[in-house]
Amino acid sequence: MGRHKTLGFIGGGRITRIILEGFRRKGVEFPEVVVSDLDQGVLSRLREKFPGIRPRKKGEVS
């Protein structure tokens, strides 16, 4: 059975951006990256910088 590795963050602030940028610099990719944040603006900015992420608003499920 193959493994599907999902990376998830609660909050899209500074630490999340630093970690995502570090993975990008090292060439580490995940099949799925999910970021949940209450602020739609934060999610939009993250999506611009990291187009591969899947942003989630409060209460949103798959």
Image: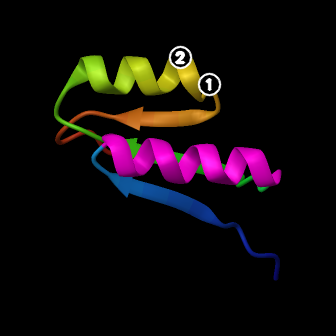
Residue 62 visible to the viewer: no
Residue position marked by numbered label 2 in the rendering: 48
Q: Is residue 12 left or right of residue 34?
A: left
Count neighbours of disc 1 (C-alpha within 10 A) and say few if under 14, some if 14 to 19, many if 20 or more: few
Q: Position of residue 13 (x, y in %)?
A: 30, 41
The relative height of residue 6 versus residue 48 in the rendered view (above or below) is below
For image coordinates 70% across by 67% down, the residue present is 4
Q: Residue, x 19% and y 27% (percent of image)?
A: 39
Q: Position of residue 21 (x, y in %)?
A: 61, 43
Q: Amino acid at mark 2?
A: Glu
Q: Amino acid at mark 1?
A: Pro
Q: Residue at x 56, y 23 (%)?
A: 49
Q: Is 17 above or below relative to 45?
A: below
When the figure is inspected, residue 54 is found, relative to residue 42, above or below; the finding is: below
Separation of marks 1 and 2 at Cα, in angstroms: 6 Å
- Pick the residue in front: 23 or 58: 23
The circle drawn on residue 51 is 1
| Nearer to me, 14 or 37 | 14
**Vertical comparison of 6 with 12: above or below:** below
Image x and y of residue 42, in percent: 30, 25
What secondary structure is found at the residue carrying circle 1? Answer: loop
Q: Can you give x and y, in whole percent of width and height, for residue 14 in the image?
A: 35, 42
Query: Mostly what secondary structure, the magenta segment?
Result: helix
Based on the displayed image, in which of its 4 quarters is residue 5 positioned?
bottom right
Residue at 56% across, 36% down: 53
The magenta-colored residue range is 12-27
Q: Are marks 1 and 2 in contact (CB under 8 Å)?
A: yes
Q: Is residue 21 left or right of residue 3?
A: left
